[in-house]
Amino acid sequence: MDLLPIIQKRCSCRRYDQTRTVERELIDKVLEAGRLAPSGKNTQPWHFYVITNAEKIKELGKAIEPGVIKDVPKMAGAAAEKGVSNIVFYDAPVIVNVSMNKKNSIDTRQMDIGLTVENMILMAETLGLGTLPVYNSKWYGQDLITQTCKIPEEEEFMLTLCIGYIDPAQPRTVRPRKELSQIATYVDL
């Protein structure tokens, strides 16, 4: 099994196929990949709050949208250009709101959130699903999502992962990456 080709072709999805529903079995596989991620001291501090109700996703997005547009006005134009009505969640049919236990140190929480979400992103890609990690949902919708998902006091909402089948009309454009020689240095040479 070679993981590198999957990583090389993966790109953020900002337009989802509105004619296809993501099967519960596939959502569970994505969540299972997140569950199996490594974590600092094996604390496994995450919790996944899954929303598949299109109206609820749209409602949350619309409530968060004004803050996003105020701070990043070009996002409204970019969303309209892509033909999506929701610039926060890009009309994704599934959103996973990820929280972390507050007892973990802030240092390990940052690492742990990256590990679990990357596992989910890569699993989704292998299943033919597109993803988009959304941090605007925390910046502009922390209280709303915490209330909606009934996230307990001992957890902190961290981010949303959008999941869905990629709209066949959306080109898969992988952004350029720096060459390895630009970002890696062998210090023992």
Image: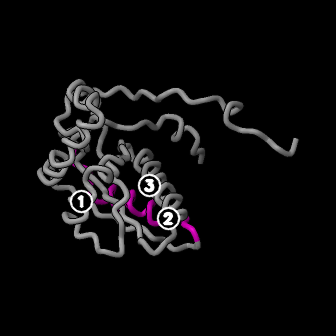
Is tag 2's residue or tag 3's residue first in the polypeptide sequence?
Answer: 2
Q: Main secondary structure of the magenta part?
A: helix
Is tag 1's residue or tag 2's residue first in the polypeptide sequence?
Answer: 2
Which residue is label 1 attached to? 145
Return the residue nearer the eye: 127 or 78. Answer: 78
Is tag 1's residue or tag 3's residue first in the polypeptide sequence?
Answer: 3
Mark 2 neighbour class, 10 Å CA radius: few under 14, some 14 to 19, many 20 or more: few
Label 1: which secondary element: helix
Quick check: is 21 in the magenta stretch?
A: yes
Return the residue nearer the eye: 73 or 18. Answer: 73
Q: Seen in the image, is 116 located left or right of residue 144?
A: right
Three-letter amino acid code of the residue under disc 2? Ile
Label 3: which secondary element: helix
Q: Quadrant of the C terminus?
A: top right
Residue 125 lies, in percent from the top left, at 42, 44
Three-letter amino acid code of the residue under disc 1? Ile
**What is the distance, in whole Å, between disc 1 and disc 3 at their CAs?**
18 Å
Three-letter amino acid code of the residue under disc 3? Val
**What is the distance, in whole Å, between disc 1 and disc 2 at their CAs?**
20 Å
**What is the distance, in whole Å, between disc 2 and disc 3 at their CAs?**
17 Å
Are the two marked residues, 1 and 2, in contact with CB atoms closer than 8 angstroms?
no
Residue pictured at 13% horizontal, 50% vertical: 59
Which residue is label 2 attached to? 106
Q: Which mark is residue 117?
A: 3
Q: What's the magenta region?
A: 20-40
Residue pictured at 51% horizontal, 69% vertical: 105
